[in-house]
Amino acid sequence: MSSRFCFVLVIFFFAATLIVAVYLRGADKRTFYEVRMCKIEQGRLQQELWQKQLRVESLINPASISRVAQPAPAGPARGKKKST
């Protein structure tokens, strides 16, 4: 009788371990999905904030925006030495 009880206990332990492993695997996937969705939303909100900041700055001082948006004038090439 004791050996049968131990066998049932071992089977129950393995079944419970497998059930918990499957649950944790699903919980991990759900957590990963939620974290990725939050990061995507954060990036979208950050881009929206930058656009609104540029819009406000252009209303306050349009010249500063055009100065920042224009490329820098091309200067002499660096790293090349003049040959004499």
Image: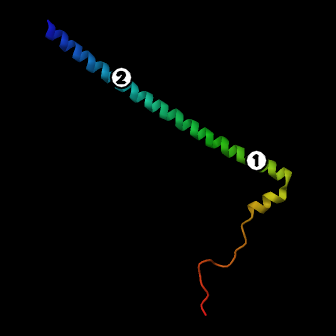
Check disc 1 and report the residue beneath it.
Answer: 53
Pointer 1 local density, CA inside 10 Å: few below 14, some 14–19, many at least 20: few
Q: Amino acid at mark 2?
A: Val
Q: Is residue 28 left or right of residue 12?
A: right
Residue 76, picture quadrant: bottom right
Q: Residue at x 39, y 29 (%)?
A: 25
**Colour scheme of this structure image?**
rainbow
Check disc 2 and report the residue beneath it.
Answer: 20
Q: Is residue 39 left or right of residue 68?
A: left
Secondary structure found at label 1: helix
| Residue 54 x/y as whole percent | 76, 50
| Residue 65 x/y as whole percent | 79, 57
Q: Residue at x 26, y 21 (%)?
A: 14
Depth check: give the residue in front, 40 or 10: 10
> Looking at the image, is 58 positioned above or below residue 3?
below
Secondary structure found at label 2: helix
Q: Residue at x 62, y 43 (%)?
A: 43
